[in-house]
Amino acid sequence: MMNIQIIAVGTIKEAYLKSGIDEYGKRLRPFVKLEITEIKEERLMKEASSRDIQKALLNEGERITEKIPSEAYTIALAIEGESCSSEEFAQMLEDVKTYNSQKIVFLIGGSHGLSETVKQSASKRLSFSKATFPHQLMRLIFLEQLYRAFMIIEGRKYHK
């Protein structure tokens, strides 16, 4: 069984998002050992300067890096990353499992994304869209795509 850890900046407060995340977590149990690690999001003023944002990203990045197991294959979710279809995502998971590691760590940044240091240290960068999504919603979207990928891998039908 594959081990997947999601390291995400921030906590989910909205009940509807928590409900969806819990549902996909349940659906994934037969396929993976899933762990979600939340990292404290830096608080910024509404009118934060570019310098303040970069400092916050560095602080969050340090906390993210501390949580990444050394043997893991890391994938940063980043808008400038490689985009792929659901079928290609499923194949990528299979390839990582076969050729790289049984432990995959996905990194989801906060409101301002991930620090360049974190993105550069990742084994791969992956984008789910050129559009920008709230990071809380991205966690739900990602889990749905992860579930869809395992349904593809298992050759099962996924009803929309």
Image (tube, helix red, strand yellow):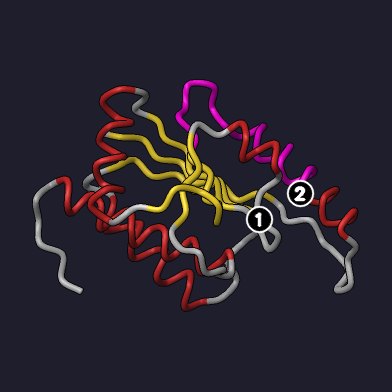
Q: Is residue 81 above or below residue 103?
A: below
Q: Are the residues flagged by discs 1 and 2 in contact, CB closer than 8 Å?
A: yes
Residue at 44%, 48% in the rendered image: 82
State how far apart marks 1 and 2 are (Cα): 8 Å
Indicate the amino acid at tag 1.
Answer: Gly
Q: Which mark is residue 33?
A: none
Q: Is residue 150 left or right of residue 140?
A: left
Q: Which mark is residue 113?
A: 1
- Local packing at callout 1 (Cα closer than 10 Å; few below 14, some 14-19, many 20+) is many
For marks 1 and 2 on the same chain, the one whose residue lies earlier in the sequence:
2
Residue at 34%, 40% in the rendered image: 33
- Local packing at callout 2 (Cα closer than 10 Å; few below 14, some 14-19, many 20+) is many
What predominant SS class does the magenta segment belong to?
helix
Q: Which mark is residue 57?
A: 2
Indicate the amino acid at tag 2.
Answer: Leu
Residue at 18%, 54% in the rendered image: 151
| Quadrant where the C terminus is found in the figure | bottom left
Residue at 21%, 47% in the rendered image: 30
Q: Secondary structure at mark 2?
A: helix
Q: Is residue 65 left or right of residue 128?
A: right
Give the magenta-colored segment's residue range: 57-74
